Image (cartoon, grey):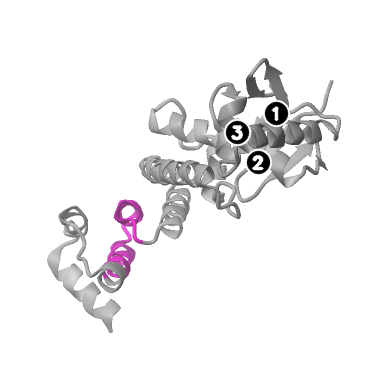
Amino acid sequence: MPKPVLLNLLGGFDLRLGRRPIELAPAAERVLAYVALHNGPASRSNVAGNLWAEMREERALANLRSALWRMRRPGVSVIESHGDRLSLSSRVSVDFIDLRSAARGLLDGRVSGDNAQLDRLVAGGDLLADWDDDWVFVEREHFRQLRLQALEQMAFEFAAAMHFGRAAETALAAVATEPLRESAHRALISVHLAQGNRTEAIRQYCVYRRLVREELDLEPSKQMNDLIGSVPSPALERAFRVIAS
């Protein structure tokens, strides 16, 4: 049985045959990543035009042919060619695609928040973090937003199941990814309140309020204030005094 080919794009580019790393030239890495990130076969002109946008079409296509030839040298087929179309080999498993599918499944209600695949969402990692290509930036931001929404949903589901440690861990991962994202802070505050940790909820509210005041000159939204307002007023005032002192 042939060994699986694993393409990891979260954090950085890493291609492996089983456990053995496969080294590719930078141009070949970009061709493979581009084809992997785009659903369905991609035309050669589309791939060449996006990867070598500053070059004439003939030169860009020549660079693509060279990159595809270099990609065959390790002896592992990762790109399939069907006429003018390029697609990812069915042998290749891509971490980004797997996690994107898991996140969408969670948000669509098709999988549970305790699914083992979703645990990897907590660990994080930006898509091709050290690449600055425009086409990577679009996919990176799309996945970042999808991951944040999935993390928040997971936090609520874990809290509803009374798995408060996992719920807090997941919400904290969302806060760490985007410290100015109010919905992430609301998810964490909701977890604290569900567990009965009112002081922790107020502390997190104060952290967020101070952050948005200093960074954006804004105040928490009514939705945030209504959430923390569920704490009885005398207890809320006492906690504010303690935390502020």
Tell me what residue is drawn at x 69 percent, y 33 percent: 64
Q: Which residues are magenta?
A: 180-209
* Quadrant of res 221: bottom left
State the residue lying farthest toward the bottom.
245
The residue labelled by disc 3 is 57
Residue 106 magenta: no
Q: Is residue 139 visible?
A: yes
Q: Secondary structure at mark 1?
A: strand
Residue 201 magenta: yes
Q: Secondary structure at mark 3?
A: helix
Q: Locate residue 105 relative to residue 93 in the image: left or right.
A: left
The CA span between labels 1 and 2 is 15 Å
> Taking 117 as reference, is 86 above or below it?
above
Report the amino acid beneath label 2. Arg
Quadrant occupied by the C terminus: bottom left
Q: Nearer the viewer, mark 1 or mark 3?
A: 3
- Earlier along the polypeptide chain: callout 1 or callout 2? 2
Q: Nearer the viewer, mark 3 or mark 2?
A: 3
- Earlier along the polypeptide chain: callout 3 or callout 2? 2
* Quadrant of res 65: top right
The residue labelled by disc 1 is 92
Q: Locate residue 29 relative to residue 107 in the image: left or right.
A: right
